[in-house]
Every structure is written in structure tokens, then in C-alpha cells.
């Protein structure tokens, strides 16, 4: 009998987000999470990236199910875009299941959805695997650490977690259960690395609530806006509770906030909070009587916060001396977008508060001391750091080495890692990569359409149209159109110069080439690219069209 389990990450190892993990035994597979990520400046026009599931798509008849640890977008966000490629049953605890239903309904997939609810602290058999769900704390209801019991040994997949004795909403981390799991024996720990390089502990949501109360009381008569991740239900409750303590009502701005609020209330969370005001209702409230929770903490251009910052929100507006609190950390790659929103706010004389100035954010992920505690409780034979960029993975690995974990191995996306009672080894590499959502389509980030767009953004374009008669002579001057090359003042003269160079290049062609469209196109293309390279130091995309009349 095969005495090995395969761990295969297809996303989340070397980047934040796009979490997708596979566990295999004798060609039967179990998936954990199916998340999205945010695109950077290197993908113009793209906001969402997804893991490429091709490996498991080719084996979907062997896929036993998709287990979801919790309802954050980096763990469920790929489902509306890619689930139809697999159509495997999804397993989640009640709150997460409700969020998935809402997302899939919006995508028109609710009627097709195969979704099974797992009770809190429940368990489920999947062929050779048995998965036990363990309560942990995070920034959203019902985050789960998974104990995956296999014929080879127990594997612990932490999902996102932290230690917080006062999480405001949701459960605390079940430390007693973790210690018991460690006593039973853990072959491998697959752990959250997000804050492994951060000293100390991640901090308590309850302490943050007290800080927000004090900050709100310092600004009587002023409108207060707080922006955070829409899925951070703990933060939503903290802000609402602090607002009530300051004698203010609470409003929500942003569809995703309303979606998460709806899921939380349907599943029994936030019962002690009154209904929130809509954006339209918020306009009637006096500035000193309201707190608005807004989407857009990562600088997303279409989110409520960005529109408030530029004065383009259809219902709400900000006045000088109003207060905006950024209660979220920046996901790497989003720093420029966030800074742009904050600059726009400051230009309107709005007070901007970040975690650099005040205690307005605590992380939902374990810091150094928390990671140390978990490793000491579980005593794994193998440590596999996931969920982070290389720096975070290496920091997590170093903790394991310091604690003398017998084997520490940093996975990369696409690594086929074999786990046996003797340890772990990389047995090979499979197809992996990133997809992106482009309008209504999902394509590879390496698709020619995407790479062309990147190049156009970097070097600009020149469009040339030529009309030739049957003798190969130009009927009229070439039509030249440029984009992203010249300033407004330079454009007329620059395009006139290119036109003269194209005329010269075409007229210099001999009889062997003037009657061949590809030769004419090539001559014109070389002329304009050489000219722009000489004047600007870059070679633009040049598209040439030849018409014979």
C-alpha cells in the first residue's frame, strides 16, 4: 500500500492571497480553499488574480471535495470564477457557507451550487481523509484550523488564525484542542506565515475596541469614516460598538459591507447591534452623530473610500476637519493606491489616521510569539510555512529551526511534496500559475492580450495607415496616430515628423518590395520605432495597415 500523502500548493506560497492547497492519497484528492488576490501595477486593467487549477481540473473526477477554512476573499474569492471548472462539492461552516451562497447567487450559480454545511467543531470523512474542524480566532466568524487525518499521519492546516482572549465576535482559539492534537502526534504543520516576522503577539480586538472608543470621543461635531476590509466582521462590530459608546449611529457604505453584514446577521452574529443606516439615510445625520464604515481600505478605485476622497460619491460627502481612519494593513502591492486615496483626502483638509499615528488596527494573523506557541503545542515532525511572500515564509521557517522541528521545508507553488512517516521531500513540480479576471473573461496573466497591454502601457503605440495605388505610389499622406509617447504640446510636431519618415521609408522601397504588403508594413514599422527610440529611448508598439486602391 502506498505509504505517502502528497501536499500540493497551487497558490499562496510566495504571494499573499490566491490560496489553493491540495492533498492527495492514492490518486484521490482533497482541496482546501480556493481564493483570489489583488493584481499589481504590472497588470494594467486587472484587479483580481486567481490560482490556475489546471492540475486538479484534469483530475476533477478524483476530487473528493473543496473544504473552506473561512470566508475571506483570499480563501473563497475564486469560487464564482472557477468553480464550474471543477463542480466539486464545497464544505464549510454555517457563516462561511452563507457568504458563499450570496457570492454564488450574484454570479448566477446558486442553483448549480453543491454546498454542505459542517457544524462548528465538526468533522467529515472524505475517502482516505478525515477532516476535523477546530475553532480558532481571526477577524471573521468561524475561522477553522483543520486536522487532516490520513493513513500516513495527522496533518494540521492552520488556515488564518491568531491568539486573542477577547475577539469581540466569534470564538477564541481552542488551545486545549490544539494541545490534545499535539499529544496525538502531528506529521506535518502547514502554517500561516503572514506575521511570522513580527515580534511579540498580534494583539486583541477587544483592546482595539477600547482605543476606537477613545478616538471617537476626541472628535465631537465631526463626521468619522472608518475603512477596513469588508469581511472583517470583528472590526465591523468593534466600530459599531465604539460608535454607540460615543453616542453616534452607524452607517455602511459599500455593497460588500452590506453583503457581509447580511451573512453575519443571518447566521446569528451581531445580534446585539441595531440595524445600520444606508448611505442615503446617512446624509440626514448630523456630522457629530454618525460613524460611516466604508469599503476601500486598499485604495480600490471604485470602492466607497476612493470616491469619498475625490468627492465623487453619489450620496455622501466629506467636509474639512472630518476624520477618516484606515483600520487595515496594506496588502503588499497596494501601497501606491492607498497613498493616492490618503493624499486626496488630505488635499480636502480631512484628518487621516492610520496605524502609524494611532492604535487603530490589530492583525488577524499570528505574530512571532503566537507561532512559537503553536509549534510547541503541536510538536510537528515537519513544518511547511505557507500563506505569505518569501520573506514571511523564511521567517516562519527560521522559527521552526530555532525550535528544533526535525524538518523544515519551504514550499513553492506547484511543488509536489511527499509526506511519509520519515519526513517530507519535493518529488516534482506540476503546472501552476496565475489567471486573472479581465471583464467577463478569465485568462492567463501570460495571455498575449494581457502581455500586449502591459507593453503598450510601458512603451506606447503608433498606428500607421497607408493607402497605395496599383503602381505602389502613396495616394495621400500616411495617417499617424500615437498614444502614450508625446506630451500634448509635442504630439502634432511629433506625428508630423513620423509621417515624413514613413513617406521616405516607403518611397525608398524597390520594385521587388513595394508591391508586397508585409514589406511595406515592415519598412514603416522600422521607421517609426527607430525615430521614437532615438527621441525617447524606447521602442513603441507599431501597428501598420496598408490599403491597395
Image (cartoon, rainbow, N blue to C red):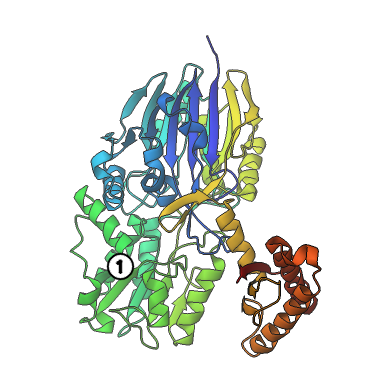
| Quarter of the image with the C terminus in it | bottom right
Q: Badge 1 is on which residue?
A: 242
Q: Where 421 sits versus 508, above or below?
A: above
Q: Report whether residue 255 is seen.
A: yes
The percent coordinates of residue 244 (x first, y second) are 24, 69
The percent coordinates of residue 306 (x first, y second) are 42, 74
Q: Where 493 sits versus 143, above or below?
A: below
Seen at 55% across and 28% down, the residue is 380
Seen at 56% across and 57% down, the residue is 450
Dividing the picture into quarters, in which one does residue 324 lie? Answer: bottom left
Q: Is residue 269 left or right of residue 141?
A: left
Dot 1: element: helix
Residue at the farthest front position: 470
Q: Is residue 107 left or right of residue 281?
A: right
Q: Report whether residue 69 is seen.
A: no
Please state the total of marks drawn on the protein image. 1
Residue at the farthest top position: 1
The percent coordinates of residue 46 (x first, y second) are 50, 60
Residue closest to the eye, 180 or 499? 499
Amino acid at each position: 500500500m502506498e505509504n505517502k500523502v502528497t501536499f500540493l500548493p497551487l497558490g499562496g506560497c510566495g504571494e499573499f492571497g490566491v490560496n489553493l492547497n491540495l492533498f492527495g492519497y492514492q490518486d484521490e484528492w482533497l482541496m482546501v480553499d480556493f481564493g483570489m488576490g489583488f493584481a499589481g501595477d504590472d497588470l494594467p486593467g486587472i484587479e483580481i488574480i486567481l490560482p490556475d487549477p489546471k492540475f486538479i481540473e484534469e483530475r476533477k473526477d478524483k476530487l473528493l471535495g473543496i473544504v473552506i477554512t473561512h470566508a475571506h476573499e483570499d480563501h473563497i474569492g475564486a469560487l464564482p470564477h472557477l468553480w464550474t471548472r471543477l463542480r466539486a462539492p464545497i464544505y464549510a461552516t454555517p457563516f462561511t457557507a452563507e457568504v458563499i451562497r450570496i457570492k454564488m447567487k450574484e454570479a448566477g450559480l446558486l442553483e448549480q451550487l453543491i454546498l454542505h454545511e459542517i457544524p462548528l467543531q465538526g468533522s467529515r470523512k472524505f475517502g482516505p481523509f478525515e477532516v476535523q474542524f477546530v475553532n480558532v480566532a481571526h477577524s471573521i466568524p468561524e475561522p477553522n484550523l483543520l486536522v487532516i487525518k490520513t493513513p500516513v499521519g495527522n496533518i494540521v492546516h492552520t488556515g488564518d488564525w491568531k491568539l486573542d482572549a477577547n475577539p469581540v465576535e466569534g470564538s477564541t482559539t481552542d488551545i486545549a484542542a490544539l494541545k490534545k492534537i499535539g499529544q496525538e502526534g502531528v506529521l506535518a504543520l502547514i502554517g500561516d506565515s503572514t506575521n511570522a516576522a513580527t515580534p511579540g503577539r498580534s494583539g486583541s480586538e477587544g483592546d482595539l475596541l477600547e482605543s476606537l472608543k477613545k478616538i471617537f470621543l476626541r472628535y465631537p461635531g465631526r463626521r468619522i469614516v472608518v475603512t477596513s476590509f469588508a469581511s472583517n466582521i470583528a472590526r465591523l462590530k468593534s466600530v459599531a460598538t465604539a460608535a454607540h459608546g460615543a453616542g453616534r449611529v452607524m452607517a455602511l457604505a459599500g455593497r460588500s459591507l452590506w453583503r457581509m453584514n447580511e451573512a453575519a446577521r443571518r447566521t446569528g452574529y451581531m445580534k446585539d447591534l441595531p440595524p445600520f443606516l444606508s448611505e442615503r439615510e446617512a446624509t440626514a445625520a448630523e456630522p457629530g452623530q454618525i460613524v460611516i464604515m466604508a469599503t476601500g481600505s486598499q485604495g480600490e478605485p471604485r470602492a466607497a473610500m476612493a470616491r469619498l476622497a475625490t468627492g465623487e460619491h453619489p450620496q455622501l460627502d466629506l467636509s474639512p476637519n472630518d476624520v477618516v481612519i484606515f483600520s487595515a494593513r496594506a496588502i503588499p502591492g497596494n501601497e501606491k493606491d492607498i497613498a493616492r486615496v490618503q493624499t486626496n483626502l488630505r488635499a480636502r483638509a480631512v484628518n487621516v489616521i492610520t496605524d502609524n499615528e494611532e492604535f487603530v488596527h490589530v492583525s488577524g494573523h499570528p505574530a512571532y510569539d503566537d507561532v512559537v506557541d503553536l509549534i510547541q503545542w503541536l510538536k510537528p515532525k515537519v513544518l511547511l510555512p505557507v500563506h505569505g511572500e518569501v520573506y514571511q515564509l523564511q521567517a516562519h521557517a527560521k522559527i521552526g529551526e530555532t525550535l528544533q522541528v526535525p524538518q523544515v521545508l519551504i514550499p513553492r507553488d506547484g511543488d509536489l511534496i511527499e509526506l511519509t512517516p520519515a519526513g517530507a521531500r519535493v518529488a516534482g513540480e506540476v503546472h501552476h500559475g496565475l489567471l486573472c479576471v479581465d471583464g467577463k473573461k478569465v485568462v492567463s496573466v501570460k495571455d498575449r492580450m494581457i502581455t500586449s497591454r502591459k507593453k503598450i502601457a510601458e512603451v506606447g503605440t503608433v498606428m500607421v495607415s497607408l493607402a497605395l495605388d496599383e503602381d505602389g505610389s502613396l495616394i495621400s499622406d500616411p495617417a499617424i496616430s500615437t498614444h502614450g509617447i508625446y506630451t500634448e504640446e509635442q504630439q502634432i510636431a511629433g506625428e508630423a515628423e513620423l509621417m515624413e519618415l514613413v513617406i521616405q521609408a516607403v518611397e525608398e522601397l524597390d520594385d521587388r518590395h513595394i508591391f508586397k504588403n508585409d514589406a511595406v508594413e515592415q519598412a514603416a514599422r522600422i521607421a517609426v520605432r527607430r525615430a521614437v527610440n532615438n527621441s525617447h529611448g524606447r521602442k513603441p508598439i507599431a501597428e501598420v495597415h496598408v490599403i491597395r486602391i
